[in-house]
Image (spheres, rainbow, N blue to C red):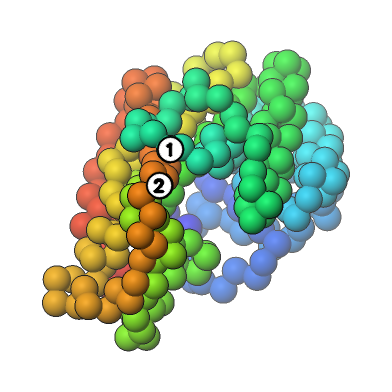
Amino acid sequence: ISYFNSKIKYPNIKIILIIRKTFDKKIYNKNIQIINKDFTKIKNFPECDFILYCLRTNSIKEDATLFKIFKNKIMKLKKKPKIIYTSSGVLYGLNKKKIKINEKFKIIKKFKKSDMYKYKWFSQKLYLERKFFDLSKDNYETIVLRMFSFIGPNILNQNYTVSQFYESIKNNKKITINGPINTFRSYLDEIDTVEWILKIFFNFKKRDFQIYNFGCDKPIRIYDLLRKMLGKKHVNKIKSFNKSNQLDYYVPSIKKLKKEFNLTKRISLDKSIKKLYLK
């Protein structure tokens, strides 16, 4: 919404957002329509060319119920929309090698007991990927984007590492990094995220069901990210960090995505960090 409020690059796009939470930000773009309801309460979906499916629930059982309702609703549409489902890179599990994760990496199904929340998230995402694969067999053009890590002022309310760092810095608190020193991530700016999804839809040619990694492919250690956010004068605020040498390399290879949809990252990590403090 923030993107389309400030951009006139796509004046003929009409965006309809179905969201359960109350939306209280001002909308300047007349082409944005908010349906402030649980989508299960809507009798019929509006006719559309594209659908971005981002529903999140607490269990596979809830996922199954919502997907069934979703499928029934799209089958009533006159024209079959093209569909993107936002999955997650969590399906690859812990990557202990310093190589970027590509779509051919095996899906890891073993999790430690301490990581059961990841297993829950993993199970739900895998379940829905399979449901969307089944949907594609009914001639719905469908692709899955396995999402990695993102940054931007509009996602600071999410419980992500960047958000936690930002809050600690804003409140002048010391920060403890609990993970291994060799924890690597990569961050795609929220503006690039929106523009990439738009380009994918616009270049969404008739194709078989496909899965793509989606995110930035430029790695950074979490420790170095925090140092960037703090600035050189305040690195003493990093209280401590795990001395383990274990490698956690959660960085995607996006060659397949960039090649097929001609995508370019425009906003650097340094610029993304600056924008956080202009919020």
Residue closest to the eye, 241 or 78: 241
Mark 2 and mark 1 residues within 8 Å of each other at the beta carbon: yes
Pinpoint residue 148: horizontal percent, then vertical percent: 46, 44
The residue sitting at 22% across, 50% down in the picture is 268
Q: Quadrant of the C terminus?
A: bottom left
State the SS at label 1: loop
Farthest residue, direction left: 233
Look at mark 1 in the image and give the residue it sits on.
96
The residue sitting at 46% across, 32% down in the picture is 213
The residue sitting at 67% across, 46% down in the picture is 119
Pinpoint residue 78: horizontal percent, then vertical percent: 74, 27
Identify the mark nearer the N-term, 2 or 1.
1
Three-letter code, disc 2 = Gln
The residue sitting at 23% across, 65% down in the picture is 227
| Residue 246 image label | 2
Pinpoint residue 208: horizontal percent, then vertical percent: 59, 13
Residue closest to the eye, 272 or 26: 272
